[in-house]
């Protein structure tokens, strides 16, 4: 078969010169772009770091955070799915987890605040609070996600129950919540609106069964408005603070807010 006519036709002189001019200009633009890109990356690399990444990128994340807070606020909810969509997530991330099963008789959750007050709670204290369940997607920044059925109490109910979330009676809530594992090897910081979100749970069951050690027994955070990194397993202490708490992955350059 013959090639289509317009491809077979020899180029006239004017078209040829026009093409040559265009390709020279394209090449110049390409080189210009390359030089600008390299200069930009070198400039970025020489800027001082803030929490693990160059400050201009940090400003972008902070801007995203402000936009997300305005758009989602505390009204926005993560999508909930029917029960039969739930499945088993992989065990992902073992920082601060114990391999042996935890003794629930001696286990305590410690809560402390910046006003110097603290208290300890048993698992039964948490299980006696109103039970809430939801089927939501656990989204890992590594690029996988899994729909899971979680049960537990609302973190907001628990914080109210402790009486430690406010500086004093009738005063404002502390602006931040920090959660850590018993050895302090994994830790997460949350803004108070996300902590008080109705879907944010202190979960003790996954897919209808008590949590396994790998999934954070006996108590983990489930916060479907944030990425997996914030869903800390094996919670041992909760701190209410005036300052942004330490956050394992934020210290390694990930977005502190980590909202969806
Ligand atoms: N203690 C602790 N909690 C953790 C992690 C971890 O390494 N240690 N990894 C986080 C990450 S990155 C993800 S995606 C989820 C995974 O939860 P799963 O193991 O129940 O699937 O746990 C989060 N909570
Ligand atoms: Mo993750």
Image (cartoon, grey):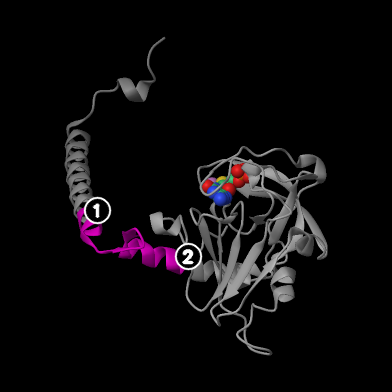
Residue 58: name its quadrant: bottom left
In the image, residue 118 sits, relative to residue 203, either above or below, namely below
Magenta highlight: main SS: helix
Q: Residues within 10 Å of mark 2 (few under 14, many from 20)?
A: some
Label 2 sits on a secondary structure element that is helix
Give the residue displayed 20% in from the left and 54% down from the top. Answer: 42
In this view, the residue in front, 183 or 42, is: 183
Q: Which residues are magenta?
A: 41-64
Q: Residue 64 bears which disc, if any?
A: 2
Question: What percent of the width, then of the height, locates residue 149?
Answer: 75, 47
Query: Which quadrant would the N terminus be assigned to in this image?
Result: top left
Q: Residue 197 bears which disc, if any?
A: none
Residue bearing mark 1: 41
Mark 1 to mark 2 CA distance (whole Å): 21 Å
* Residue 135 counted in the magenta span: no
Left or right placement of residue 20 versus residue 56 in this view: left
Question: What percent of the width, then of the height, locates residue 238?
Answer: 60, 66
Give the residue displayed 19% in from the left and 54% down from the top. Answer: 39
Residue 160: name its quadrant: bottom right
The reply to whether dot 1 and dot 2 touch (C-beta < 8 Å) is no
Q: Residue furthest front?
A: 106
Left or right placement of residue 105 versus residue 98 in this view: right
In this view, the residue in front, 37 or 225, is: 225
């Amino acid at each position: 078969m013959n090639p289509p006519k317009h491809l077979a036709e020899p180029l006239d002189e004017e078209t040829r010169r026009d093409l040559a001019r265009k390709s020279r200009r394209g090449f110049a633009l390409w080189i210009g772009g390359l030089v600008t890109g390299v200069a930009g990356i070198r400039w970025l690399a020489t800027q001082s770091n803030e929490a693990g990444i160059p400050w201009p990128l940090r400003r972008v994340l902070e801007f995203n955070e402000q936009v997300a807070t305005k758009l989602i606020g505390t009204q926005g909810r993560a999508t909930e799915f029917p029960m039969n969509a739930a499945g088993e997530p992989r065990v992902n991330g073992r920082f601060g987890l114990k391999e042996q099963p935890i003794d629930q008789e001696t286990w305590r959750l410690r809560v402390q605040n910046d006003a110097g007050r603290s208290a300890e709670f048993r698992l039964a204290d948490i299980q006696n609070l109103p039970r809430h369940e939801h089927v939501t997607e656990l989204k890992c920044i590594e690029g996988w996600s899994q729909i899971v059925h979680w049960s537990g109490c609302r973190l907001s109910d628990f914080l109210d129950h402790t009486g430690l979330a406010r500086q004093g009676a009738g005063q404002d809530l502390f602006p931040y919540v920090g959660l850590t594992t018993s050895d302090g090897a994994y830790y997460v910081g949350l803004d108070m609106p996300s902590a008080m979100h109705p879907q944010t749970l202190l979960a003790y069951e996954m897919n209808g069964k008590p949590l396994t050690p790998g999934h954070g027994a006996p108590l983990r955070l489930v916060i479907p408005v944030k990425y997996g990194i914030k869903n800390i397993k094996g919670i041992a202490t909760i701190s209410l603070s005036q300052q942004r708490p330490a956050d394992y992955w934020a210290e390694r350059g990930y977005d502190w807010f980590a909202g969806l």
